[in-house]
C-alpha cells in the first residue's frame, strides 16, 4: 500500500478529481491523504509530464529563435563593417561619401542590407523579443536616414555599435533561457522519479485508502 500526503509538495494527487478519495490522517488528525487507482496515478503523472514537456519545448524553441537572431545580427554587422571606411552610396547619380566615382553596384548593396535588416527584425518579432525589435528598427531608421542617398561611415559605426549591443542582449537572454531549461529538466526528472516510486509501491490491483486493508 502507498499513500501520498498532500503536504509533501510532490504530486498533487487530489488534482485527479474523481479518481482520488480523501480521508483523515489518523495519526496527525489533520492533513488529508489520497488513495488512487493505478490508472489514476498514471493518468495524473502523464498529464504532469505533458505540461512540463510543453514548457521545455517552448523554451528550446525560444533558444533556437535567439540563435537565429544572433546569426543574422552577426552577419549584418560583418556586412555593414565592410563599408565602414567609405560608407554606402546607393544613388548612382551621386558621388559616394569618400568622394570616389559613382558606383552603380551600391544600389544593389543598399537593397540587400536593407532586406537583411528587415529579415533580422522579422526573426526578432517571431521570438517575441520586443526590445530587440525596437533596437533593430532604430538601426533600420539610421540606415535609411530619411531616404537620403547615402549611409555615412559615422552612421555605419553607430549601427555596428547598436548591433553589438543587441547581440549582447540576445546572449544574456539565451543564458537565462538555458538556466530555465535546466530547471524544467530537473522538474521533469523529479516527476519521473516520483512516478517510478509510486508505481513500484502500488498494489497489483489498486491503491488502498489509508488505514484500510
Image (tube, grey):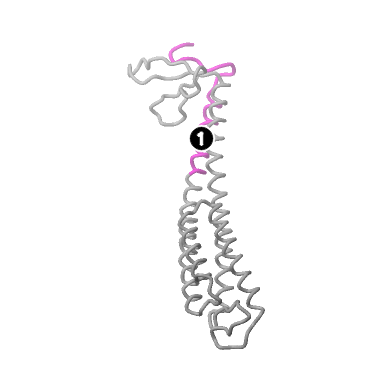
204 inside magenta stretch? yes
Q: Write down the quadrant of residue 26 in the picture.
A: top left
Badge 1 local density, few (<14 within 10 Å), some, or many (20+)? some
- The magenta segment is 184-213
Rendering coords of residue 191 (x, y %): 51, 35
Foreground pick, 138 / 196: 138
Foreground pick, 30 / 126: 126
Q: Furthest-left residue in view? A: 29
Foreground pick, 178 / 100: 100
Rendering coords of residue 30 (x, y %): 33, 19
Residue drawn at x 51%, y 51% is 128
Whether 195 is drawn above or below 111: the answer is above
Rendering coords of residue 15 (x, y %): 47, 24
Secondary structure found at label 1: helix
140 inside magenta stretch? no
Residue drawn at x 55%, y 35% is 49
Q: In the image, 161: left or right of 28?
A: right
Rendering coords of residue 166 (x, y %): 48, 64
Q: Is most of the magenta stretch helix, strand or loop?
A: helix
Residue drawn at x 49%, y 54% is 129
The residue labelled by disc 1 is: 191
Amino acid at each position: 500500500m502507498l499513500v501520498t500526503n498532500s503536504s509533501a509538495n510532490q504530486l498533487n494527487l487530489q488534482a485527479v478529481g474523481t479518481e482520488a478519495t480523501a480521508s483523515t490522517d489518523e495519526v496527525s488528525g489533520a492533513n488529508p491523504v489520497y488513495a488512487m487507482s493505478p490508472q489514476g496515478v498514471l493518468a495524473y503523472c502523464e498529464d504532469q509530464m505533458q505540461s512540463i514537456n510543453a514548457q521545455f519545448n517552448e523554451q528550446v524553441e525560444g533558444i533556437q529563435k535567439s540563435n537565429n537572431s544572433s546569426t543574422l545580427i552577426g552577419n549584418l554587422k560583418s556586412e555593414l563593417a565592410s563599408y565602414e571606411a567609405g560608407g554606402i552610396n546607393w544613388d548612382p547619380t551621386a558621388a559616394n561619401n569618400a568622394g570616389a566615382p559613382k558606383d552603380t553596384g551600391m544600389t544593389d548593396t543598399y537593397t540587400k542590407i536593407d532586406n537583411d535588416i528587415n529579415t533580422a527584425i522579422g526573426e526578432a518579432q517571431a521570438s517575441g523579443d520586443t526590445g530587440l525589435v525596437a533596437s533593430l528598427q532604430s538601426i533600420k531608421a539610421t540606415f535609411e536616414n530619411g531616404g537620403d542617398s547615402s549611409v555615412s561611415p559615422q552612421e555605419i559605426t553607430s549601427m555596428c555599435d547598436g548591433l553589438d549591443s543587441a547581440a549582447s542582449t540576445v546572449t544574456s537572454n539565451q543564458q537565462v533561457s538555458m538556466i530555465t531549461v535546466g530547471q524544467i529538466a530537473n522538474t521533469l526528472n523529479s516527476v519521473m522519479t516520483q512516478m517510478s516510486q509510486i508505481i513500484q509501491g502500488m498494489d497489483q490491483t489498486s491503491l488502498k485508502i489509508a488505514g484500510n486493508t
